[in-house]
Image (cartoon, rainbow, N blue to C red):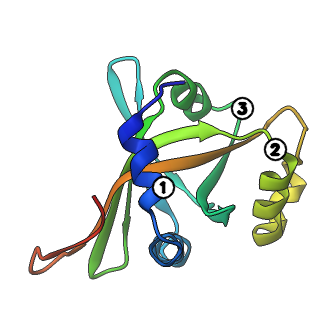
């Protein structure tokens, strides 16, 4: 896992209001798209989970998936979501959190996932983001609203 003082500073400055706005946008416009790096190839996939727990933005995947290996080897990510009028773009670092509390918090919001995942099952992987940049961009005008910089 990479240490990134810039990401740590950005996360510390991320207000609860901005975090809730980002989370709401992702949840209301699922799927959003997560970009990772697989050796020398960019990978993008739709994601359907987001959660706020202990003032951090979380998402979930399975340890058997390629995205898990990519996040563990190169944790720098980007996320994009679109609501038909605005793009949300997020840059940051993904950190795995093995706590049962983080997993349970997400599963409360996505109870249908309990059919496939459970805290401590060896497959459910929770990641939180240290967000270093986030902005909303109007698709027609190109005007940007900086949420985190």
On the question of residue 85 being in view, the answer is: yes
| Residue at 81% from the left image edge and 44% from the top image edge | 99
* Residue 44 figure quarter: top left
Picture disc at residue 12: 1
The quarter of the picture where residue 87 lies is bottom left
The numbered disc on residue 103 is none
Query: CA separation, marks 3 and 1?
Result: 28 Å
| SS under mark 3 | loop
Mark carried by residue 63: 3
| 30 vs 116: above or below | below
Q: Give neighbour class at mark 1: few <14, some 14-19, many 20+ (Cα, 10 Å).
A: few
Q: Tell which tag, 3 or 1, sits nearer the viewer.
A: 1
Q: Residue at x 88, y 57 (%)?
A: 114
Say above or below: 62 vs 83.
Answer: above
Badge number at residue 99: 2
Q: Are marks 3 and 1 in contact (CB under 8 Å)?
A: no
In the structure shown, which secondary structural element does the residue marked by tag 1 occupy?
A: helix
Determine whether, in the image, residue 107 is placed left or right of residue 145: right
* Residue 18 place in picture, x, y as percent: 44, 74
Mark 3 vs mark 2, CA separation in Å: 15 Å
Q: Nearer the viewer, mark 3 or mark 2?
A: 2
Q: Give how far across and how far down residue 6 sits, in percent.
A: 35, 41
* Nearer-N-terminus badge (3/2): 3
Q: Nearer the viewer, residue 147 or 32?
A: 147
**Crowd class of label 2 (few under 14; some 14 to 19; many from 20; radius 10 Å):** few
Tell me what residue is drawn at x 41 percent, y 43 percent.
7
Camera sees residue 44? no
- Image quadrant holding the C terminus, namely bottom left
């Amino acid at each position: 896992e990479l240490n990134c003082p810039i990401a740590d500073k950005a996360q510390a400055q991320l207000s609860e209001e901005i975090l809730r706005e980002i989370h709401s946008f992702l949840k209301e416009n699922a799927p959003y798209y997560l970009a990772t790096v697989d050796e020398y190839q960019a990978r993008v996939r739709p994601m359907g989970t987001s959660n706020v727990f202990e003032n951090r933005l979380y998402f979930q995947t399975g340890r058997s998936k390629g995205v898990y290996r990519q996040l563990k080897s190169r944790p720098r990510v980007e996320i994009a979501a679109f609501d038909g009028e605005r793009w949300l773009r997020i840059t940051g670092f993904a950190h795995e959190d093995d706590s049962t509390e983080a997993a349970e918090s997400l599963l409360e919001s996505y109870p249908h996932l309990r059919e496939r995942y459970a805290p401590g099952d060896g497959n459910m992987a929770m990641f939180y983001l240290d967000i270093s940049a986030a902005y909303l961009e109007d698709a027609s005008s190109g005007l940007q609203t900086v949420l985190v910089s």
